[in-house]
Amino acid sequence: MKHKTEWLLCPICGNKTRNQIRNDTVLINYPLYCPKCRQETLINVKQLNITILKEPDAKMQSR
């Protein structure tokens, strides 16, 4: 059986992360880190379906 692989995309900025998933990958409470926007998002993955559990809180801007 051939496994299909896809790159995990950042749910915030939409860029590729450093992680790939296959159609048989199951992730529960996975902290997905994006090197571009430097945000971490908690996700679940099952059969290439990604569910966002917690997006990062908005950070206060320093002056």
Image (cartoon, helix red, strand yellow):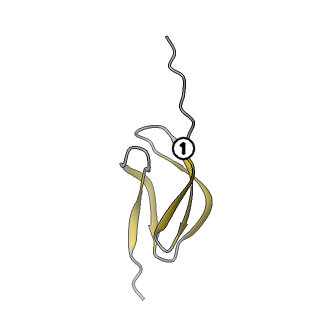
Q: Residue furthest left?
A: 15
Q: Kindly identify the residue that appears in the image at 36 percent across and 49 percent down.
A: 14
Q: Kindly identify the residue that appears in the image at 38 percent across and 66 percent down.
A: 6
32, 1: nearer the viewer? 32
Please provide percent x and percent y for residue 39. 50, 40
Please provide percent x and percent y for residue 43. 56, 56
Q: Residue furthest right?
A: 29
Please provide percent x and percent y for residue 11. 44, 50
Q: Kindly identify the residue that appears in the image at 49 percent across and 74 percent down.
A: 47
- In the image, 37: left or right of 29? left
Please provide percent x and percent y for residue 46. 54, 71
- In the image, 5: left or right of 54? left
4 w.r.t. 33: above or below: below
4 w.r.t. 60: above or below: below
17, 52: nearer the viewer? 52
Q: How many marks?
A: 1
48 w.r.t. 44: above or below: below
Q: Amino acid at mark 1?
A: Glu
Q: Quadrant of residue 13?
A: top left
Q: Kindly identify the residue that appears in the image at 54 percent across and 47 percent down.
A: 41
49 w.r.t. 34: above or below: below
Look at mark 1 in the image and give the residue it sits on.
40
30, 18: nearer the viewer? 30
Picture quarter with the N terminus: bottom left
Q: Residue furthest top?
A: 63
Q: Quadrant of residue 26?
A: bottom right
